[in-house]
Image (cartoon, grey):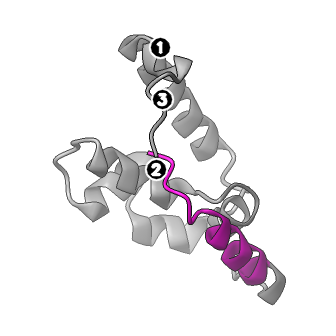
Amino acid sequence: MHDTTDPLDALPDDVAAAAFRRLVRHLRHRHDAQNIELMGLAGFCRNCLADWIRDAGYEGDKAEARALIHGMPMDEWKATRQSEASEEQIARMQASIAKNAADLR
């Protein structure tokens, strides 16, 4: 359930947008932080951010949203940045996804 008293909602859109862009640029720079690791620790990754911008009204399709967040097409990202996931990483990701059951919108 969305808390309407959350001070985050009072954050000016330009400030929130600047922080979001900084986060995305940071993730582009830190390509060593694999999506599966982000999912395992935080329950979201670059692909989630791409889904969230579409949910917020971005008119591009899924591939365009992912390219925007990754800074390159997804196929290029996978070929140049993504490594094979270990069983441990997959297990952590699955446990983390289970924690996401609560709707945070």
Quadrant of the snapshot with the C terminus: top left
Which residue occupies the foreground of this view, 50 or 3?
A: 3
Residue 15 vertical placement versus 20 (above, below): above
Q: Bounds of the magenta span?
A: 89-105
Identify residue type, mark 3: Arg
Q: Residue at x 34, y 45 (%)?
A: 53
Which residue is located at x 52 percent, y 21 percent? 8
Give the residue at mark 3: 21
Q: Main secondary structure of the magenta part?
A: helix
How many residues crowd around disc 1 within 10 Å: few (fewer than 14), some, or many (20 or more)? few
Q: Going 51% across and 48% down the picture, which residue do you hit?
A: 104
**On screen, residue 50 above or below 29:** below
Residue found farthest to the bottom = 87
Q: Secondary structure at mark 3?
A: helix
Q: Earlier in the sequence, mark 3 or mark 1?
A: 1
Compare marks 1 and 2 and give the one earlier in the sequence: 1
Front label number (1 vs 2):
1
Q: Earlier in the sequence, mark 3 or mark 2?
A: 3
- Amino acid found under the numbered disc labelled 1: Leu
Q: Residue 58: x and y, percent?
A: 23, 43
Q: How far across and how far down the image is residue 42, in percent?
A: 70, 54
Left/right placement of residue 81 relative to residue 40 reads: left
Disc 1 marks which residue?
Answer: 11
Label 1 element class = loop
Q: CA distance from mark 3 to mark 2?
A: 11 Å
Q: In this image, 46 relative to 93: left or right? A: left
For residue 88, side relative to residue 78 (left or right): right
Check disc 2 and report the residue beneath it: 49
Check residue 57 for magenta coloring: no
Residue type at numbered disc 2? Leu
User: Is residue 105 among the parts visible in the rendering?
Assistant: yes
